[in-house]
Image: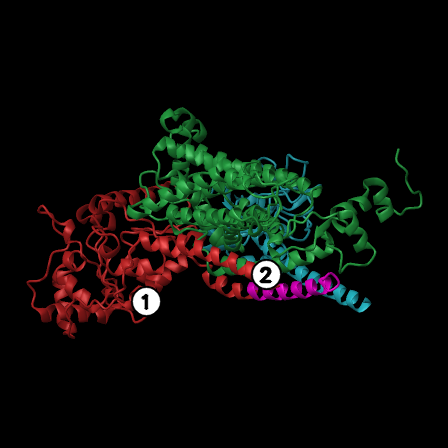
Chain colours: A red, B cyan, C green
């Protein structure tokens, strides 16, 4: 009995050594650990509450030339595809920004989009960010814009809305809606078409948008359907907060999500990429309970059989 | 000694029972893997625009992978209908139509519509149906099945159960039970 | 015509015995298949391997119902249809992936148990050889299976391993293209590896398993002291009732009872991994769809191939291939390289005991080096470990020849 336990200890020891070497240790050598900033944006200046009415005035006169605001029934000046030809990407609707973006980030972004998004390295040789800088505006005005955007934002936002607002203009997600025969594309949820011709026409629009996006970004941002399993929680958290920390030189902008905004986006990524996780976690308990019972019964049977053999 | 044998047998049987329970649950899981997938069940509905239908010209739509016949009846056809026939008419925009799954209730071939005779003949084994798809000749055992449908103006939506469908269901004329074509 | 008992009821024991010798079969294969009593839990690895192989077969059958062997459809057929739509599809996939990795842990434990206790010597050479053939066929099965999800790792592993067949300086690029059926791993490559994984390799594996069992029957299972047992005398003792002093036990149910107990504990670990800790078996890199225009920053094979992969790496292309081929083949030759006449456990064999642990530790170091990026001191350690591996096999005949007969 003692000998068997000693042998077991040796087997377990060497198994754990090889596991440690090949998994945690090797992976630590392949990727340096990046600390999370917990979406506190410590490097950005504080933002005070502004005047909502003044903010609305400023937004209407400065922003609606490019941005739609569904909450105020302001339509987009151009459709998504035409916008992408002009700007590289479709300017987002502003209704949800106050709900998912950090206020400090919003202010910094309005003042200098490329700097706040940490993509200044892309705009050299006379190229400039499609959205102009508003650093000529007084600080109180920018704060008023932020307050206005927060006032029109919904109190509760669904994970899908957070995702489409923060990520959906660059990233497709073919698994999103697949069960109903639909999918998320950069220009919106592709509906189900009765006639193949209409379906193909929509696909062509998406491809043209993606071509414009590819020209603007350098390469097509990947489909995010299963990114939750391809990268994992920690990588995505640090990457989304500051893409440069994980992929130095990347064209992906720092999106400026608040902590709640990030949690909502992650929830959507879990929903489309790993929907069986809750079942897996709960069913696992039952499986383990069963195997423990099986092991105990097998042990008792073995003891009773071997009583006459020892 | 025999106590030990009994205990051994009892423990063996207990383990066997535990293994059997695991086996049964595994079989349940395996059965579920064969179930139709959610995307198949979320087949959704097919919308058919009926405003341009010609009389006595049969069109075939697809719903859940199956053919669905839609036939606009002429006034003559309506006049010659039995009361069971009339009970199965789908009235869209004041006009009478046949709407049914275009599969023979014998073994599933697609019956052909005969324009001149205003009936259906199934080439596989010779079954025949009248203009309301009620079976008139063996080996067809039942009328062709009327699928769930809803009427929205001139649009016919296959796959959703509207009030007219529910009425037909209550009257037992959908085709799940035999009907007399002459009654 | 054989003798038939007229009064035997159909499908009764007598009826079956008259026709297929069921009583003899039962005696030879279970109730009087004598196993030494002096064994430990490591002797249950064979049963664990059989059960794990069974789990791979059954989970594989359900995956096979929905998998699409087409480069445009494969990735989503696995990661969407099976993982998200099929009832318990995620469970079948997790079981299959984890079992494929765990089966190699069991194979290595089983193999090293055999090396330690000398279960490859005198009379048991064919058990060892058929076992090593199973190692090779399981490796081919695992590699072909890994291609199927058509993720980034599938594609680039396929690219790298098929490139090996250019045979270094021989530059047999035609051979490489023939294996792939294309210039790069593509549709033809995927579907032929699907054929190998789903039909040909499983049939070959099952056939070799039958041979493995067949070659074990006459020499009998070994024991912890390597003692030569007179099975006839011990069987008499057992059958006369002296089961406590007999040195042997029945396969059914004595040996099986211990097997099932070890199996029970194993299943707890196995299902814990399936549900809660599976990244080691389902590497995140393979959740990126295959892209022929982009190599991942780090490519590596599954853990069980790492030691072998690392032997290839430190040397120049040709030398590396030769070393790699050496590493695959050398284990098969163990019964013939070990020149000692003793069938006893390693701790009684002096230098061989040292050799055993040196080999095990060397292969673990090789595995870790095979995973880490090939830079700086890792390269040096990898080189010396590869040289040590070759050196150990070279000195094996020498140190075993020196062993005194015990």
Q: Can you give x and y, in whole percent of width and height, for residue A82 in the image?
A: 21, 47
Queried whether the magenta region covers residue A307, the answer comes back as yes
Q: CA distance from mark 1 to mark 2?
A: 61 Å
Query: Looking at this view, is C389 or A66 the one in front?
Result: C389
Residue C61 vertical placement versus A157 (above, below): above
Q: Residues within 10 Å of mark 1 (few under 14, many from 20)?
A: some
Question: Closer to the camera, B69 or B20?
Answer: B20
Q: Position of residue A135 (x, y in %)?
A: 8, 62
Chain containing mark 2: A
Determine which residue is flagged by label 2: A3
Q: Quadrant of residue C315?
A: top left
Magenta residue span:
A287-310
Cβ–Cβ below 8 Å for labels 1 and 2?
A: no
Q: Position of residue C114 (x, y in %)?
A: 58, 47
Using a 10 Å C-alpha cutoff, classify the residue at mark 2 as few (fewer than 14 neighbours), some (14 to 19) or many (20 or more).
few
Residue A80 seen in render = yes
**What residue is shown at x 30% (from left), y 48% (from top)?**
C377
Instruction: Tell me where residue C343 appears, x and y as whole percent.
Output: 62, 45
Q: Residue at x 48, y 49 (%)?
A: C360
Identify the disc placed on residue A157.
Answer: 1
Query: Mark 1 falls within which chain?
Result: A
Specify whether residue B38 is in view: no
| B59 vs C154, nearest the viewer | C154
Q: In this view of the protein, which residue sits in the foreground, C300 or A45?
A: C300
Tell me which numbered mark, 1 or 2, is placed earlier along the sequence: 2
Q: Magenta stretch mostly in which secondary structure?
A: helix
Q: Residue A233, located in which quarter of the rendered image?
A: bottom left
What secondary structure is found at the residue carrying circle 2? helix
Q: Secondary structure at mark 1?
A: loop
Instruction: Give the number of the disc on residue C198.
Output: none
Number of labelled discs? 2
* Residue C399 sits above or below residue C81 on the image: above
């Amino acid at each position: 009995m003692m000998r068997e336990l000693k042998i077991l200890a040796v087997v377990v020891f060497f198994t754990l050594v090889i596991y440690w070497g090949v998994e945690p240790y090797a992976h630590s050598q392949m990727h340096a650990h990046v600390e999370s900033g917990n979406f506190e944006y410590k490097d950005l200046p504080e933002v005070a509450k502004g005047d909502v009415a003044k903010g609305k005035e400023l937004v209407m006169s400065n922003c609606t030339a490019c941005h739609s605001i569904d909450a105020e029934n302001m339509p987009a000046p151009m459709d998504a595809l035409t916008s992408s030809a002009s700007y590289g990407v479709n300017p987002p609707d502003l209704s949800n920004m106050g709900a998912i973006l950090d206020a400090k980030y919003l202010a910094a972004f309005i003042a200098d989009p490329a700097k706040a998004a940490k993509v200044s390295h892309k705009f050299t040789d006379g190229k400039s960010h499609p959205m102009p800088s508003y650093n000529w505006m007084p600080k109180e005005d920018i704060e008023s814009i932020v307050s206005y955007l927060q006032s029109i934002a919904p109190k509760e936002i669904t994970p899908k809305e957070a995702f489409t607002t923060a990520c959906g203009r660059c990233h497709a997600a073919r698994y999103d809606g697949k069960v109903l025969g639909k999918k998320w594309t950069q220009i919106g949820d592709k509906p189900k078409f009765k006639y193949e011709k209409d379906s193909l026409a929509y696909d062509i629009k998406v491809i043209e948008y993606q071509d414009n996006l590819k020209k603007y970004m350098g390469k097509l941002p990947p489909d995010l359907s299963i990114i939750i399993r391809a990268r994992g929680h920690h990588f995505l958290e640090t990457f989304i907060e500051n893409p440069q920390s994980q992929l130095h030189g990347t064209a992906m902008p720092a999106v400026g999500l608040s902590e709640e905004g990030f949690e909502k986006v992650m929830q959507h990524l879990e929903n489309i990429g790993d929907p069986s996780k809750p079942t897996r976690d709960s069913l696992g308990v039952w499986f383990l309970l069963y195997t423990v019972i099986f092991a105990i019964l097998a042990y008792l049977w073995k003891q009773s059989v071997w009583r006459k053999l020892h | 000694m025999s106590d030990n044998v009994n205990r051994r047998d009892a423990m063996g049987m207990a383990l066997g029972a535990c293994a059997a329970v695991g086996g049964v649950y595994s079989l349940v899981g395996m059965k579920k893997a064969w179930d139709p997938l959610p995307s198949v069940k979320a087949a959704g509905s097919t919308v058919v625009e009926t405003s341009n239908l010609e009389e006595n010209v049969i069109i075939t739509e697809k719903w859940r992978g199956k053919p669905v016949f839609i036939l606009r009846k002429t006034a003559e056809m309506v006049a010659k209908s039995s009361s069971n026939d009339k009970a199965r008419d789908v009235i869209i925009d004041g006009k009478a139509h046949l709407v049914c799954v275009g599969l023979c209730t014998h073994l599933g071939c697609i019956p052909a519509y005969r324009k001149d005779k205003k009936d259906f003949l199934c080439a596989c084994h010779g079954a025949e149906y009248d203009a309301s798809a009620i079976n008139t000749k063996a080996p067809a055992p039942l009328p062709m099945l009327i699928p769930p449908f809803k009427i929205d103006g001139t649009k016919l939506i296959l796959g959703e159960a509207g009030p007219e469908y529910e009425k037909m269901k209550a009257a037992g004329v959908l085709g799940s039970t035999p009907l007399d074509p002459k009654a | 015509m054989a003798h038939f008992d007229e009064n035997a009821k159909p499908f009764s024991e007598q009826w079956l015995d008259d026709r297929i010798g069921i009583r003899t079969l039962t005696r030879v294969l279970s109730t009087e298949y004598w196993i030494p009593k002096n064994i430990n839990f490591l002797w249950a690895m064979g049963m664990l391997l059989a059960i794990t192989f069974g789990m791979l077969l059954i989970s594989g059958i359900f995956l096979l119902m929905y998998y699409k062997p087409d480069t445009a459809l494969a990735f989503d057929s696995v990661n969407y249809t099976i993982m998200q739509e099929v009832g318990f599809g995620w469970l079948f996939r997790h079981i299959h992936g984890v079992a494929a990795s765990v089966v190699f842990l069991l194979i290595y434990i089983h193999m090293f148990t055999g090396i330690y206790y000398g279960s490859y010597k005198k009379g048991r050479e064919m058990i060892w050889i058929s076992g090593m053939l199973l190692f090779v066929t399981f490796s081919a099965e695992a590699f072909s299976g890994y291609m199927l999800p058509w993720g980034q790792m599938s594609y680039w592993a396929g690219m790298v391993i098929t490139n090996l067949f250019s045979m270094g300086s021989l530059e047999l690029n035609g051979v490489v293209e023939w294996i792939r059926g294309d210039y790069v791993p593509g549709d033809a490559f995927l579907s032929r590896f699907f054929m190998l994984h789903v039909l040909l390799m499983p049939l070959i594996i099952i056939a070799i398993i039958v041979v493995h069992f067949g070659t074990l029957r006459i020499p009998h299972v070994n024991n912890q002291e390597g003692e030569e047992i007179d099975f006839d005398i011990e069987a008499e003792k057992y059958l006369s009732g002296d089961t406590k002093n007999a040195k042997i036990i029945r396969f059914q149910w004595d040996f099986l009872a211990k097997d099932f107990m070890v199996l029970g504990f194993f299943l707890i670990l196995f299902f814990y991994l399936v549900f809660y800790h599976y990244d080691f078996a389902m590497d995140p890199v393979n959740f990126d769809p295959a892209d022929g225009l982009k190599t991942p920053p780090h490519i590596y094979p599954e853990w069980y191939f790492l030691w072998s992969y690392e032997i290839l790496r430190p040397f120049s292309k040709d030398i590396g291939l030769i070393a790699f081929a050496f590493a695959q083949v050398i284990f098969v030759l163990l019964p013939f390289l070990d020149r000692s006449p003793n069938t006893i456990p390693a701790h009684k064999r002096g230098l061989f005991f040292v050799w055993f642990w040196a080999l095990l530790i060397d292969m673990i170091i090789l595995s870790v080096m095979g995973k880490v990026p090939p830079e700086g001191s890792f390269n040096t350690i990898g080189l010396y470990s590869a040289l040590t591996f070759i050196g150990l096999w070279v000195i094996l005949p020498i140190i075993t020849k020196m062993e005194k007969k015990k």
